[in-house]
Image (cartoon, helix red, strand yellow):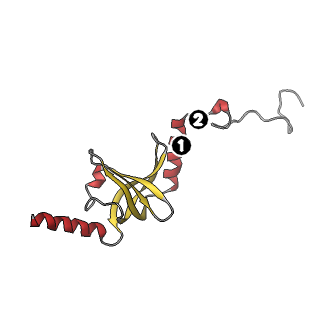
Amino acid sequence: MSGTQAGWFDEPASTAYPGEAPETALAITILTRAAKDVIEGAFSPLWVRGEISDFKSHRNGHWYFSLRDAESRVRCVMWRGDVQRAPTKPTDGMLVTAFGQMTIYTNGGDLQLRVLRLGAAGDGLWRKALEETLARLRA
């Protein structure tokens, strides 16, 4: 066998993939964008159920909160355009259903649920909206 032809027992040419070695180390932005692509590709938009915690309404109209159960929690964001379709602002401790897309917030590297619709598990959100409306009418 000549020296220019690869044989069966020769070392393979370097096929280092990105991140396999220090020379091919990934930038953090590339890593978080790749993770986002994987997460968004693995999960179609879906419904989840959990308890609201750490609710914050930002001055720009976005809502930030967590959904949790007895063992886990996931951070959530609901953009202003989606917030406008919610019956009312939820409160900590309220059990809700949320429809959204799992994603990675690339600037922080955080797994989060981008909530598109928020509903009550039971009648919590609608009952709260009704009570708020009745209180305004009485005032």
From the viewer's perspective, tell me whether residue 81 is left or right of residue 22: left
Gap in Å between the C-alphas at discs 2 and 1? 10 Å
The total number of labels drawn is 2
Q: Where residue 56 sits: x, y (%)?
A: 32, 51
Q: Residues within 10 Å of mark 1 (few under 14, many from 20)?
A: some
Determine the residue located farthest toward the bottom in the rendered image: 122
Circle 2 sits on which residue?
Answer: 26
Kindly identify the amino acid type of the residue bearing the numbered disc 1.
Ala
Residue shown at 35%/56% (left/top)? 116
Q: Where residue 111 sits: x, y (%)?
A: 48, 50
Residue shown at 45%/39% (left/top)? 107
**Kind of element beneath mark 1:** helix
Kindly identify the amino acid type of the residue bearing the numbered disc 2.
Leu
Q: Where residue 94 sits: x, y (%)?
A: 34, 65
Residue shown at 34%/72% (left/top)? 122
Determine the residue located farthest toward the right in the rendered image: 1
* Labels 2 and 1 touching (C-beta < 8 A): yes
**Closer-to-camera residue (93/124):** 93
* The C terminus, quarter of image: bottom left
From the viewer's perspective, tell me whether residue 121 is left or right of residue 71: left
**Closer-to-camera residue (37/50):** 50
Residue shown at 29%/50% (left/top)? 80
Circle 1 sits on which residue?
Answer: 34
